[in-house]
C-alpha cells in the first residue's frame, strides 16, 4: 500500500479511523505487527554443521590414524575436534540469541481510533492506516507518520546519536516522496525509538512487522549466512593444501618408481602422505581463539554476531568516532567565541558580557530547541549555546518563538523568530528569520558552508585549523 494513500486518507479522517471491516481486511493482507522467527531445532543445527567437508576430512584422518595404531593420538584428535565442533555450534546459537533479543514487540498496548471510537489494543494488531493517539512516553511499535502535534524522540537505537530528534506534523501540501530510509524525514516516527516528550499527538501507521525500517534491518541479519566469509576463506585454504598435496603425492610416486625402482607400495602410505600434507588441526586453530575472544568480550557486555568481526577488529589500530555524544558524555560546554570583523578575526571571548550582540543573538535565536514543562530540550550543542546566553525561550508555534533576555541584556530587547529553516544535510546549515528587534537572518552550519556565503578571509582556514586541532 502506498504510504501517501494512507496519509491522504488519514488526513481527511482524523476523528474516524478505520472501520472494523477495514482493519480485519488489512490484518489478513499485511499480517500482524509482529516480527517472529523460526527456532532451529538443535539436531538440525548439528547436522547442518556436520555437512561441511572439513569434518569429513577429519573423520578420514581419525580413521587412518586408528588403522595405523595411533590410538592415543587419534582419540586426543577426536576430542579436540568435538570441542571445536561444539564451540562452533554454540557461537552460532549465541549469535541467533542476540538477534532474537532485538526482535520483540514494543509497547504492548496503544490507543487507536476505529469507527470514531478510542480504545486500547495490543500493538500486534496494528495495521497500515490505523490512527494512533500518543499521549505519553512509549516505545513506538511500528513506523508511523505524525499528522497532528509535535514531539521529541530519542533515535539513538537507530542512528546512534544521543541528541533528541524533533518531529513535526505532516501537511498534505508537502509535495515530496518518502525516502527509503525514513530517518531523515522530520515527521516520520521510526519503530523501536522512544518518545521523550509529547502533547496529545496523532499518528498514522504506515508500515508494520518486517516492512518497518527496523524490521528490514533485522530481516537482513536473519537472512545472512553466519560467518560466510570465514568459512569461504577456510575452504579456499584447504583447497590450496589439497592441490599442493596432489603435487606432493605425484612427485612421491615418481620418485619411488623411477629412482627407487619400487614396483609396489602399500596404498595406505600414499593416503597417509596425502593426509599429512593438510593440517588436520587447522579448523581448531582458527576457530578456538576467536571463540575464546568472543566469550571474553561477552563478559564485558560486548556482543558479536559474527566471528568475522573479531578477525577484522584484530587488525584495527585506531578507531575514530564522528561526534561528541555518540560514545562520550552527551553534554557540551562553550569555551568561547572568535568574532570576525573587517575580514579578520579577533581574540577569544569567553564570557557573554564580552561578546557583541550579533554573537549573543545567533546563540540565543538560531536553533531548533523546544520547551517541555519549562525545560529546554534539543540538540546538546544548541542547548549549551543557548543556556550560556541566559535567555528565556517561549515557543509560539512550530516555526516561530520568542527569546527574552536576562536582566544584563535588557537593553538589547526581546528577539522574535518568525520563521525557522531546519538544518539541511545538502546545505549543511540552518537559518532563522527574525522580525524583532531587527529584520535579519541568523545562519549557522559547518565551517565550509558558512565560508561559502561570507566574504573571503585570508586567515579563516588558519583560525579554523588552529582551534580544531587544539
Image (spheres, helix red, strand yellow):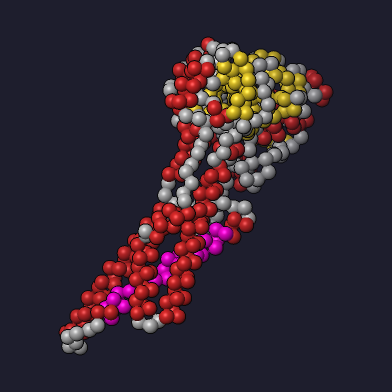
For the point 44% across and 57% down, the residue is 46
Q: Residue 287, how many percent across, how many down?
A: 47, 63
Residue 186 visible, this angle: yes
**Depth check: 346 or 143 in front?**
143
366 on left or right of 27: right
Taken as a whole, is the magenta stretch helix, strand or loop?
helix
357 on left or right of 216: right
Which quadrant of the view contains residue 331? top right
The N terminus: image quadrant: top left
Q: Which residues are magenta?
A: 269-295
**Depth check: 271 or 340 in front?**
271
Which quadrant of the view contains residue 135? top right
Q: Residue 458, how many percent across, how many down?
A: 56, 36
Q: Residue 312, how many percent across, how many down?
A: 48, 56
| 388 to 234, vertically: above or below | above
| 296 to 336, vertically: above or below | below
For the point 60% across and 25% down, the residue is 121
Q: Residue 206, how many percent across, how many down?
A: 50, 24
| 270 to 142, vertically: above or below | below
Number of numbered markers: 0
| 65 to 353, vertically: above or below | below
332 on left or right of 65: right
User: Is residue 44 one of those drawn in magenta?
Assistant: no
Which quadrant of the view contains residue 429? top right
Residue 279 visible, this angle: no
**Depth check: 422 or 280 in front?**
280
**Depth check: 435 or 259 in front?**
259
For the point 50% across and 39% down, the residue is 36
User: Is residue 285 one of those drawn in magenta?
Assistant: yes
For the point 47% across and 32% down, the residue is 211
Amino acid at each position: 500500500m502506498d504510504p501517501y494513500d494512507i496519509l491522504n486518507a488519514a488526513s481527511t479522517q482524523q476523528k474516524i479511523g478505520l472501520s472494523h471491516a477495514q482493519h480485519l481486511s488489512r490484518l489478513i493482507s499485511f499480517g500482524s505487527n509482529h516480527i517472529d522467527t523460526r527456532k532451529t531445532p538443535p539436531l538440525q543445527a548439528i547436522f547442518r554443521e556436520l555437512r561441511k567437508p572439513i569434518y569429513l576430512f577429519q573423520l578420514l584422518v581419525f580413521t587412518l590414524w586408528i588403522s595405523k595404531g595411533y590410538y592415543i593420538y587419534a582419540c586426543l584428535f577426536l576430542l579436540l575436534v568435538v570441542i571445536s565442533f561444539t564451540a562452533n555450534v554454540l557461537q552460532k546459537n549465541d549469535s541467533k540469541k542476540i538477534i532474537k533479543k532485538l526482535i520483540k514487540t514494543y509497547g504492548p498496548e496503544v490507543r487507536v481510533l476505529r469507527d470514531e471510537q478510542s480504545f486500547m489494543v495490543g500493538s500486534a494488531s496494528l495495521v497500515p492506516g490505523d490512527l494512533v493517539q500518543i499521549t505519553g512516553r512509549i516505545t513506538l511499535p511500528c513506523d508511523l507518520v505524525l499528522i497532528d502535534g509535535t514531539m521529541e524522540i530519542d533515535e539513538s537505537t537507530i542512528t546512534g546519536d544521543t541528541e533528541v530528534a524533533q518531529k513535526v506534523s505532516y501537511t498534505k501540501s508537502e509535495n515530496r516522496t518518502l525516502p527509503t530510509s525514513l530517518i531523515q524525514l522530520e515527521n516520520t516516527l521510526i519503530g523501536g525509538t522512544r518518545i521523550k516528550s509529547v502533547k496529545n499527538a496523532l499518528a498514522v501507521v504506515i508500515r508494520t512487522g518486517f516492512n518497518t525500517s527496523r524490521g528490514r534491518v533485522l530481516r537482513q541479519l536473519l537472512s545472512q549466512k553466519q560467518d560466510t566469509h570465514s568459512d569461504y576463506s577456510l575452504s579456499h585454504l584447504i583447497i590450496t593444501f589439497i592441490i599442493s598435496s596432489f603435487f606432493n603425492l605425484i612427485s612421491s610416486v615418481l620418485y619411488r618408481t623411477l629412482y627407487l625402482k619400487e614396483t609396489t607400495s602399500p596404498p595406505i602410505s600414499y593416503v597417509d602422505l596425502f593426509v599429512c600434507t593438510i593440517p588436520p588441526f587447522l579448523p581448531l586453530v582458527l576457530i578456538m581463539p576467536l571463540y575464546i575472544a568472543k566469550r571474553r568480550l561477552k563478559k564485558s557486555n560486548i556482543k558479536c554476531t559474527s566471528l568475522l568481526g573479531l578477525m577484522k577488529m584484530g587488525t584495527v589500530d585506531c578507531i575514530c568516532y564522528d561526534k561528541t555524544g555518540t560514545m562520550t558524555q552527551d553534554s557540551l560546554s562553550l569555551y568561547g567565541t572568535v568574532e570576525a570583523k573587517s575580514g579578520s578575526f579577533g581574540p577569544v571571548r569567553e564570557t557573554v558580557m564580552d561578546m557583541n550582540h550579533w554573537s549573543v543573538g545567533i546563540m540565543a535565536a538560531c536553533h531548533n530547541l523546544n520547551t517541555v514543562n519549562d525545560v529546554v530540550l534539543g540538540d546538546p550543542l544548541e542547548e549549551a549555546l543557548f543556556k550560556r546566553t541566559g535567555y528565556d525561550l517561549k515557543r509560539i508555534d512550530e516555526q516561530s518563538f520568542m527569546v527574552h533576555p536576562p536582566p544584563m541584556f535588557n537593553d538589547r530587547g526581546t528577539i522574535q523568530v518568525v520563521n525557522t529553516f531546519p538544518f539541511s544535510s545538502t546545505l549543511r546549515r540552518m537559518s532563522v528569520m527574525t522580525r524583532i528587534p531587527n529584520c535579519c537572518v541568523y545562519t549557522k552550519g559547518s565551517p565550509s558552508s558558512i565560508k561559502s556565503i561570507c566574504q573571503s578571509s585570508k586567515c579563516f582556514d588558519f583560525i579554523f585549523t588552529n582551534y580544531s586541532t587544539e
